[in-house]
Amino acid sequence: MSPKIKGENLYSRSFVSRKWTFLLCFASFCFGIFFTDRMWNIPESNDMARPSVTEAERLKLISEGCGPKTLYQKEVKRDPQALFGEVSKTHNAIQTLDKTISSLEMELAAAKSAQESLTNGAPVSNDVEKNQLLGKKRRYLMVVGINTAFSSRKRRDSIRTTWMPQGEKRKKLEEEKGIIIRFVIGHSATAGGILDRSIEAEDKKHGDFMRLDHVEGYLELSGKTKKYFSTAFSMWDADFYVKVDDDVHVNIATLGETLVRHRKKPRVYIGCMKSGPVLSQKGVRYHEPEYWKFGENGNKYFRHATGQLYAISRDLASYVSINQHVLHKYANEDVTLGAWFIGLDVTHIDDRRLCCGTPPDCEWKAQAGNICVASFDWTCSGICRSADRIKEVHRRCGEPEKAIWKATF
């Protein structure tokens, strides 16, 4: 081949190579622009909007060839009853969960109170020990705590000989009727002194005391009430917890029948509701040091149960036990209890049979078939000279002993 022809062939190949190189470069440039533009238009993953269920359904309908009219008809045909059923199921599930949490809170409160009682050396009843060994807690109808003091031995003996069963009868009352009755008392300022030893000797004889980790004193009644409910709740699982003074006559069967009527109601507070004046004058009985919290002078307290006898349901006792460290105490014990419940969704039940007078008042009512639950004298905030007169009240206004065993709770 001549040099001329050879040169021409080399030039042709070089030209073809440069041509294809140019085309490839141009194509790469265009592809790069297209790809870069797509990358800039893609939103970041965190900002991407995810279609809702409704949007997904719309896209599906549109892809199937459905127009806006068909789409509207599809939405209108949704069954309202089905939607209501789903809402109802959700509501029921929430209620069940709420009850479970509430139950766990009450069990936790009971465990904490029991632990505190053991830590502080408070005695635990035989029933509690038995149930702990069996790994269960029996449900009682009511726990009746009789508020008493070191100086009230005669009052306690008068109650033991009238409306409070003794010995085997009291044990039978607990086992068959689910009714616990105890005298409630704390300890003296000098724990282990002569006053405490006298109560220990009395308890050894009768076995009917409930001891509190509380220093006794008239000005400490609000604190004693709080301690009573929290301790009783930790010791016995009951439908109701009752507080009564040791100078009041009580018909136990009638009390039980009264409480049973309200057994299925949540957060029940039962008593003789009143609204007395707020006393700002120092030195008078029932003086309220925090009177200014209740408004101007001359105002009255909110409605609350009189202190001679009242009852609260299990969930309210649980509330007191759980929140005992933050519940405020006023000078008067009955006002204090009412204050704890005034801001809650609580059913206040005003039952005047819980505050009858002594004979002839309670006697007339019994003859009319309206047996009183509790009897006392308003002038004395209890039965005047109760240690001497309670036997007469019991004879004239007390229910027969067989009424307790015939009652169905």
Image (cartoon, rainbow, N blue to C red):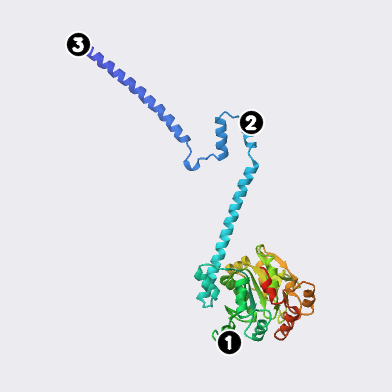
Neighbourhood count class around disc 2 (C-alpha, 10 Å): few under 14, some 14–19, many 20 upward: few
Tell me, for residue 69, which label it has, or none.
2
Q: Is residue 7 above or below residue 294?
A: above
- State the separation of the CA atoms marked 3 and 1: 142 Å
Disc 1 target residue: 198
Is residue 102 toward the left or the right of residue 246 in the image? Answer: left
User: Of the residues shown, which amino acid type is indicated by label 2?
Assistant: Lys
Q: Position of residue 166 (x, y in %)?
A: 63, 80
Number of marks drawn: 3
Question: Residue 76, how many percent across, how many down?
Answer: 65, 36
Distance CA(mark 2)–CA(mark 3):
82 Å
Which amino acid lies under the numbered mark 1 shown in the image of this protein?
Answer: Ser
Question: Which mark sits nearer the N-terminus, 1 or 2?
Answer: 2
Question: Which secondary structure lies at badge 2?
Answer: helix
Which one is in front, 4 or 207?
A: 207
Q: Quadrant of residue 237 in the image?
A: bottom right
Q: State the quadrant of the N terminus.
A: top left
Q: Residue 352 lies in what quarter of the image?
A: bottom right
Among numbered discs 2 and 3, the one appearing first in the sequence? 3
Frontmost of labels 1 and 2 is 1
Residue 244 in view here? yes
Q: Where's the C terminus, which quadrant?
A: bottom right
How far is disc 1 from disc 2 in space, using C-alphas? 91 Å
In x, y percent, where is residue 218?
65, 81
Q: Secondary structure at mark 3?
A: loop
Does dot 1 land on a helix, a strand or a loop? helix
Residue that mark 3 sits on:
2
Question: Of the residues tagged 3 and 1, which is closer to the observer?
Answer: 1
Marks 3,1: beta carbons within 8 A = no
> For the residue marked with disc 3, what is the amino acid?
Ser
Seen in the picture, residue 196 relative to 111 is either above or below; the reply is below
Left or right, residue 11 beside residue 221: left
